[in-house]
Amino acid sequence: MVQIPKQPVPPTPAQRPVPTSADVARLAGVSRATVSYVLNNTSAVRISEPTRRRVHEAAKELGYVPHAAARSLRAGHSRMVLMPTPSVPVGPLYSQFLNELQWALGRMDYTVVQYGSVGLHGDEAARAWAELRPVAVLVPGSDLGPQGVAVLKRSGARAVVTLGPERVEGAHALLMDHDKVGHSAGVHLLARGRRRIGVVVPEEPGLEIFSKSRLDGVRRSLTGTDATATALPLAYEEGAAARLAARWRSLGLDAVFAYNDEYAMLLMRALQEEGVGIPDETAVIGADDLMLGRLLRPRLSTVHIELPSGRDLAELVDRVVREPGAAPESHEVLGARVVHRDST
């Protein structure tokens, strides 16, 4: 075990008074109202660019930032959008989507807070989120129930938006049906002449909300044909992939939909080390269309997943915040199309 050496505690410096908007106003030579208009980006009042510049320079020199709680009191609600961290592993595609969403909400003057709710689930998690009094909550996955939505709304949340496979009563829903991801992969493999298709089912906890739908989608694509789909449980570990590859030929499979690109790369490497020819013996297709898949040899075929733009979702959140009495909306937001490369 690496020990972190203890450092002597330095003496605490004398605490300087917290700068106020009045201090900024005096330094900039303007009124406190002008400081408020400038720093809160108020568009209803016209203020010259030189004045705006003086206010920003004074605030920077003093280290002044507006008080979020005071601004919330004036507006009648907070500008905080709470985003609970997903309880399942998320890949680069979803992370990019969340980053874009946070940027777009920030441009609309919302403060985005990610909340780590490890160990909290369902309505218990909703009560913890409600303590922060967010104006909106964006909930990934399917843990939240109608009672949790009601708790959030009673605490002042004007917008509760879920991102997952099913609607939740009382919440706006962005429906992400992963069935079509598996269906697209299955249709592609059938068109390439494959009839004995393996489908990787990750063993990581929480991913079943995606993997089950993807497996169902492959099976749906094979309906009415002589093709078969075989579920292949697989942990995201080199050893697990090697063990599966070692018995691959005994399974009699001629193709595999590997859940996503990361699992596809893991399994493809293990198959190659066992001497299994790709795509001659086994066609391999992933999902997410990661750049690394294009760098592999053979290049990885994949299902390109289309998510809503962060800007579109930010605009939905803003509209619901401004119209809290509107009926909950549902939007199908996940698209899928195959990108055919060398591995199939």
Image (cartoon, rainbow, N blue to C red):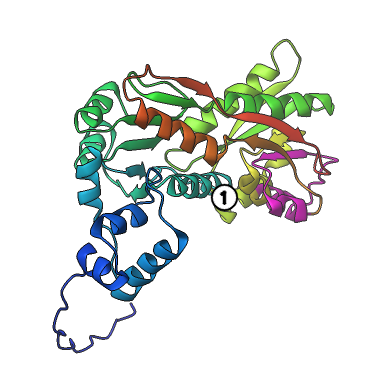
User: Please, what is the three-letter code of the amino acid marked with disc 1?
Assistant: Pro
Residue drawn 78% across the image and 47% down it: 276
Q: SS at mark 1?
A: helix
Question: For residue 327, what is the image quadrant?
Answer: top left
Q: In this figure, which residue is indicated by the disc labeled 1?
A: 92
Answer with left or right where residue 222 lies relative to residue 243: right
Instruction: Inspect the magenta stretch and tell me whether residue 283 lies in it.
Output: yes
* Magenta-colored span: 267-296
Question: For residue 83, what is the image quadrant?
Answer: top left
Instruction: Inspect the magenta stretch and tell me whether residue 162 lies in it.
Output: no
- Outermost residue on the top side: it is 224
Give coordinates of residue 313: x percent, y percent: 49, 35
From where the camera sits, is residue 246 visible?
Answer: no
Tally the numbered discs. 1
Quarter of the figure that contains the C terminus: top right
Answer with left or right where residue 173 lies relative to residue 22: right
Give coordinates of residue 47: x percent, y percent: 40, 54
Quarter of the figure that contains the N terminus: bottom left
Q: Using the image as rendered, state which of residue 49 and residue 159 is in the foreground.
A: 49
Residue drawn 22% across the image and 33% down it: 156
Q: Few, some or many C-alpha atoms within 10 Å of disc 1 (few <14, some 14-19, many ≥20)?
A: few
Question: For residue 144, what is the image quadrant?
Answer: top left
From where the camera sits, is residue 104 visible?
Answer: yes
Relative to 21, does residue 92 appear above or below in the rendering?
Answer: above
Residue drawn 53% across the image and 28% down it: 176
Residue drawn 36% across the image and 30% down it: 322
Q: Using the image as rendered, state which of residue 162 and residue 266 is in the foreground.
A: 162
Give coordinates of residue 108: x percent, y percent: 44, 44
